[in-house]
Amino acid sequence: MRLQSFLEELVKKHRDLTVEGNVAEYIPQLTEQEPRALGVTVRTCEGKVYSAGDCPVSFTLQSISKVITLILALMDHGPDFVFDKVGMEPTGDPFNSLFKLETTKPGKPLNPMINAGALVVSSMIKGESAEERMERILQLVRDMAENPEIEVDEAVYHSELATGDRNRALAYLLKEFGSIRDVDATLELYLRHCAISVTCDDLARIGLCLARYGRSENGEEVVPHSLARLVKTFMVTCGMYNASGEFAIQAGIPAKSGVSGGILASVPRRMGIGVFGPSLDEKGNSIAGVRLLKELCREWELSIF
């Protein structure tokens, strides 16, 4: 009960921070989100569940889906193939920047957690058709979250498809470098997996699966142990956009954010955490969600360092 009341206090304390941020306006459908919403769910390896705030609210994965597609690409091809085409280094640039794509090593994105890297990773997913590839991504999300009802939010997908000019520009640039072949198919797949709809509890279950090194709560191995370890490393170094270093120092846990306001966090061998707060800071992270997580990590001594 003490942990439950502490989460409720955190939500109440940090909700007022939402007025200092803004919902993502470049995706029109996301402007319909309630900017003062804030929720958190924690699932521990001992089977305890704690929730506070606006946890039942559904939202889309957005960049959090990059964790899922990276896992699937690694399962399909192995690390050598994947990291020959996508790097492993953090970036100090915004997640949708074109700059490093031309100036560092042309055509090789710095890491899989930025948009350019995620587009290349998405193009690696195996399948006979676009529908089959998307179904494999969706199934992995469902398996990790243990929720067979998870689906794509079609309204958000079409909103992003209509306004995603920067992602389209990135895709054409990647095609010029030979990093992807089919711009339209890759872009469609990428935007569809970004539009997968979840709740805080779904994120907490996914985080718990990673915390248990690929095993879901029912004990099934959904993700190979080595890949669960690898993606958590990317979450630490690259998961919070160009605020990843600061978050690693102040919170010290693997986490991945999305511009819908979601944050997926995983504390190895301890817990999975799902946060939702659609009001964003200038880096694209949930302004209240980040502050809530930092305090949670400090008070519960969750840092892995």
Image (cartoon, rainbow, N blue to C red):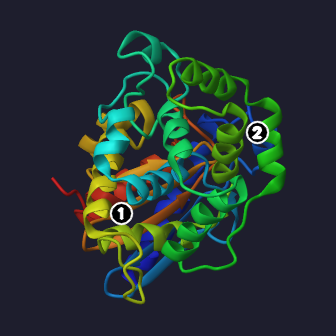
Against 137, residue 219 (above or below) is below
Q: In x, y percent, where is residue 222?
A: 42, 75
Q: Residue at x 77, y 58 (%)?
A: 153
Q: CA distance from mark 1 to mark 2?
A: 28 Å
| Residue 23 makes an appearance in the image | no
Which sits in the foreground, 84 or 159? 84
Kind of residue sitting beneath label 2: Glu
Work out which residue is located at the far top of the displayed protein and give it.
Answer: 103
Give the secondary structure at mark 1.
strand
The quarter of the displayed image where residue 273 is located: bottom left
| Residue 209 makes an appearance in the image | yes
Q: In x, y percent, where is residue 9?
A: 48, 66
Q: Which mark is residue 160?
A: 2
Q: Which residue, given by chain and number where applicable, does mark 1 sit on? A: 266
Q: In x, y percent, where is residue 223?
A: 38, 70
Against 302, residue 188 (above or below) is above
Q: Residue at x 55, y 45 (%)?
A: 122
Kind of residue sitting beneath label 1: Ser
Which sits in the foreground, 151 or 208? 151
Give the secondary structure at mark 2.
helix
**Labels 1 & 2 near each other (Cβ < 8 A):** no
Q: Is residue 15 left or right of residue 108?
A: right
